[in-house]
Amino acid sequence: MHQPAIPHLAAADPELAQLVEGEAKRQFEKVRLIASENYVSTAVLEATGTVLTNKYSEGYAGKRYYEGQQFIDQIELLAVARAKAVFGVDHANVQTYSGSPANLAVYLALAAPGDTVMGMALPAGGHLTHGWSVSATGKWFNAVQYGVRKDTGRVDMDEVRELALAERPKLIFCGGTAIPRTIDFPAFAEIAREVDAVLVADIAHIAGLVAGGAHPSPVGHAQVISTTTHKTLRGPRGAMLMSDAEHAKALDKAVFPGLQGGPHNHTTAAIAVALAEAAQPSFRDYAAGIVANAAALADALTERGFDLVSGGTDNHLILVDLTNKGIGGKPAAQAMDRAGIELNYNTVPFDPRKPFDPSGVRLGTAAITTRGLGVEQMPQVAAWMDRAITAANDGDEAAIGVVAGEIAEHLAGYPMPGWA
Ligand SMILES: *Cc1c(COP(=O)(O)O)cnc(C)c1O
């Protein structure tokens, strides 16, 4: 059963309540390896389900456009103070609705339409909002894109520097959605200084690792830091913009009134809760556990002949090129989903196949680490993946069903926040 219990929802809307219960059970029974997902705590779930959703509060604490902010101001100030303490930044804005609008606010604050901006190409591991062609950021700005080296699968800082010197971007984004390696913030900062660009570190994926000391921090290198709150940071769906004092005002103005109306106060409260959790000593163990699990899973997959982009991982994320396994990323991901292993198909750098039918899969260890799985279970996870792919290649649905059963049985021993 969903936890907290949802009796009122079940009475008012049984159809919807049943779907929620179904999703909770699905999350309980699957090895959840989607690199951007997690299990939030029951406290975070409770905060998102409060009457704070009833309140409008356009503006910032002490300068609102609506009355009745006696509690909302305190909640937002608490979230801001905790963000500043956890990440060690001068300024934090906790109102951005999600990672993509947070990045749009950065453009609005620091660039004008048509300006040159630079980011990592989507097929190399960057995010849509870093200037990819189909995104507003690629349409409204002159976006130039860096990638990774073909031989190493890693960002080539010499290429980044040459491109920056040639194009003189106003903004340089570093970070992305499918980067299995440590981001070299000092090297990006040096290049940004050389061309007088603002460096934006988008740590959406790795924020929990940064907060927990398992990935170097961009603070002191990037003037602006953008992050989601719902990936490794393990908070509600939302985002934050952080910065040095110099860029604080411009970012705040871009978020409101530039881009958004009223903040989602129930989300702000849940972000505050997640940040309090991230300040606990146990969060450092969680962050270290994510990285240890990813390393152990990468080793186990390599031993089984899987081809990992860049040869492994430094963080929570693994990108697998399935070409040598004789299966595309999409049919592999679908077969693994049927086998109780949830991940996503993904392009690999220099992918000869199309984005909707690419060569790889992407996975991450944040959710399974939260669930309590440790390094000793990673060879088993790799074995399940291997069996699911072999069964898919053989068209053996029965074998896929057997794996799903084993997984559900195994995971029954691991409690899940949100389920009782
Ligand atoms: C997930 C992600 C985003 C976007 O977040 P949404 O909340 O999905 O809009 C932005 N940048 C990076 C690097 C991400 O991984």
Image: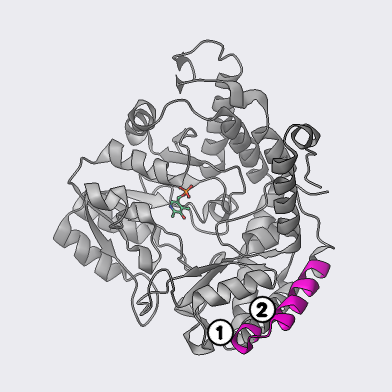
Q: Secondary structure at mark 1?
A: loop
Q: Residues within 10 Å of mark 2 (few under 14, many from 20)?
A: many
Q: Nearer the viewer, residue 229 or 329?
A: 329
**371 is higher (above) or lower (below) than 1:** below
User: Counting other residues with Cα less than 10 Å from the Cα at mark 1, is it few (<14), some (14-19), or many (20 or more)?
Assistant: many
Q: Is residue 251 above or below residue 363?
A: above
**Amino acid bearing label 1:** Phe
Q: Is residue 320 above or below residue 237?
A: below
Residue 340 falls within the magenta-colored stretch? no
**Is residue 58 visible in the rendered structure shown here?**
yes
Q: Residue type at mark 2? A: Ala
Q: Are marks 1 and 2 in contact (CB under 8 Å)?
A: yes
Q: Is residue 320 visible?
A: no
Instruction: Looking at this view, name the residue that lies furthest to the left.
Output: 166
Label 1 belongs to which residue?
A: 306
Q: Which residues are magenta?
A: 391-409
Residue 130 % position (x, y)? 33, 54
Q: Where does residue 44 sit, x and y in percent of width and height?
A: 68, 39
Asked whether mark 2 and ligand 1 are closer than 8 Å, the reply comes as: no
Looking at the rendered structure, which numbered label has been put on residue 382? 2
